[in-house]
Amino acid sequence: MTTTLTPAPGRTPERMATNHIGLAETVRQSFTMGWRGVLKIRHNPEQLFDVVLQPIIFTLMFTYIFGGAISGDVQHYLPVIIPGILMQTVIVASIVTGTQLREDMDKGVFDRFRSLPIARISPLAGALLADVIRYLIATVITFAVGIAMGWRPDPVGVLASTALILFCAFAVSWIFALMGCLMKKATAVQGVSMMIMFPLTFLSNAFVPVDTMPGWLQAFVNVNPASHLVTAIRELCDTGHAGIHVVWSLVGAVVLIAVFAPLAVRAYIRNAR
């Protein structure tokens, strides 16, 4: 005789598999999924081309084109431009997270993950954690190019800035993870994401002094989160000490994770394909 186990009303097998997973196990599963992402990068190193080449090209191009006009010479412009290039490169690189998620969903990979008895957030968190390696590579290359050109930041500030930018990029990537879950095409994710991120990065204090802008634009630039992040990196690299902009950047990153991570998980459960 065969006995069939029927879940109680309101308790689907998926919910039964995920309701009792604790925080420690969720973290472990997320890092396991992150290792899958690392292996993807290892077998497809072309994924690193943007974070390797973009910091070099942008730093050289912006420094030698605008350095003399804005700061008088290249050496005085480096403390201004390197944090700006770092913010732009790493934050824009987080857009790839959403496009890769959409591509994996189109292939049915995440449907398999949903059938496993794992925490719902772990496939998404793992993918985002793996991309932190890309952000770290971009950060190291940006700092290395700046130092090679004559910039001399505070060593402690460089380490603190690295931790700050990685955490903020991880937080921002949840926005693009949500977009990857909601949109039907990877190209749509990339197009909309770039349309959002380029105004935020260029309409900031990343490349030029704010006081050279029109008054109405200064009002936006001063409240732009990208401006706070760039100023925080400059403060850390110049003095090695954290100021109020570091606090605002951390608070903003925590808020982004608190808001967009649950939304991304819900969208992932509903619209994985």
Image (cartoon, rainbow, N blue to C red):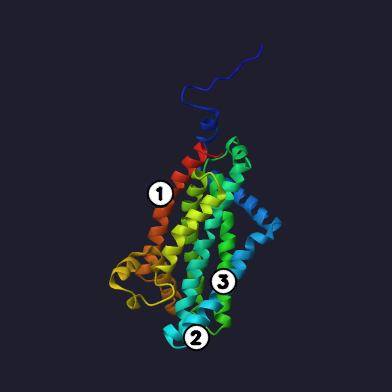
Which tag is nearer the camera, tag 1 or tag 2? 2
Which image quadrant for residue 115?
top right
Say what secondary structure mark 3 lies in.
helix
Query: Could you tell me the amino acid type at mark 3?
Result: Pro
The picture places residue 206, in percent across and down from the top left corner, at 43, 72
- Disc 2 marks a residue whose amino acid type is Val
User: What is the number of the mark on residue 74?
Assistant: 2
Mark 1, other Cα within 10 Å: few <14 / some 14–19 / many ≥20: few
Which disc is residue 259 wearing? Answer: 1
Q: Residue at x 57, y 65 (%)?
A: 136
Left or right: 183, with 204 as reference point: right
Taking 203 as reference, is 265 left or right?
Answer: right
Query: Would residue 256 be found to the left or right of residue 22 on screen?
Result: left
Q: Residue at x 38, y 59 (%)?
A: 251
Amino acid beneath label 1:
Val
At label 3, counting other C-alpha atoms closer than 10 Å, the crowd grade (few under 14, some 14-19, many 20 or more) is many
Q: Can residue 64 be seen here? A: yes
Residue 233: where, in percent of width, then height?
44, 72
Q: Which residue is mark 3?
A: 55
Q: Is residue 18 above or below residue 203?
A: above
